[in-house]
Image (tube, rainbow, N blue to C red):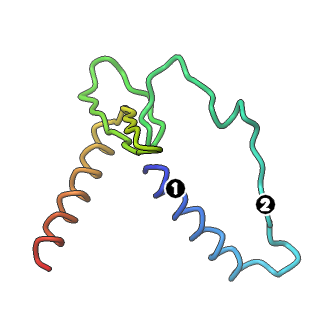
Amino acid sequence: MGRAAVAREHQATRESAREILPREQHVSFSTASHEALFAQSDEPRCDVCQALLRDDDDAGAGMYVWSRGGEITREEAPLCKECGGAIFASALGMIDFDDEE
């Protein structure tokens, strides 16, 4: 799960909680410290599921690409075998869908 997918899942979870919980029990916000958000681990972990990546794994990598002010930035993100395959299959399905239009 990438950052956008996590945001969508978080939104869906909040919407389903609104249907279940009474109004007075709703959580309107949550906080996290800068240290928690940007903590660096000494161990390589999958960027999607946070699974520990071992040296003998067939780990892959994804790439975040964005631009700001004309500067293009690329950030490589380690992925476990399962998440890499799932993202690849999802992207392949999107390409096939675009070709049909």
Image location (x, y in percent) of residue 72: 37, 39
Judged left or right of residue 31, residue 70 is left
Q: Residue at x 41, y 45 (%)?
A: 67
Q: Which residue is mark 1?
A: 6
Above-or-below relation of 100 to 9? below
Disc on the earlier residue, 2 or 1: 1
Above-or-below relation of 50 to 94? above
> Badge 2 local density, few (<14 within 10 Å), some, or many (20+)?
few
* C-alpha span from label 2 to label 1: 16 Å
Could you tell me if residue 10 is visible in this image? yes
Image location (x, y in percent) of residue 66: 40, 45
Image location (x, y in percent) of residue 87: 29, 51
Judged left or right of residue 28, residue 81 is left
* Residue positioned most to the right: 24
Marks 2/1 in contact by CB < 8 Å: the verdict is: no
Judged left or right of residue 24, residue 61 is left
Q: Residue at x 33, y 36 (%)?
A: 80
Q: Residue at x 63, y 28 (%)?
A: 39
Q: Nearer the viewer, residue 41 or 19?
A: 41
Tally of marks: 2
Q: Which residue is mark 2?
A: 29
* Residue positioned most to the front: 70
> Badge 1 local density, few (<14 within 10 Å), some, or many (20+)?
few
Please identify the quarter of the rendering in which residue 25 is found.
bottom right
Which quarter of the rendering shows the C terminus? bottom left
Q: Amino acid at mark 1?
A: Val
Q: Amino acid at mark 2?
A: Phe
Image location (x, y in percent) of residue 53: 38, 26
Please identify the quarter of the rendering in which residue 14 is found.
bottom right
- Secondary structure of the residue carrying numbered label 2: loop
| Marking on residue 48 | none
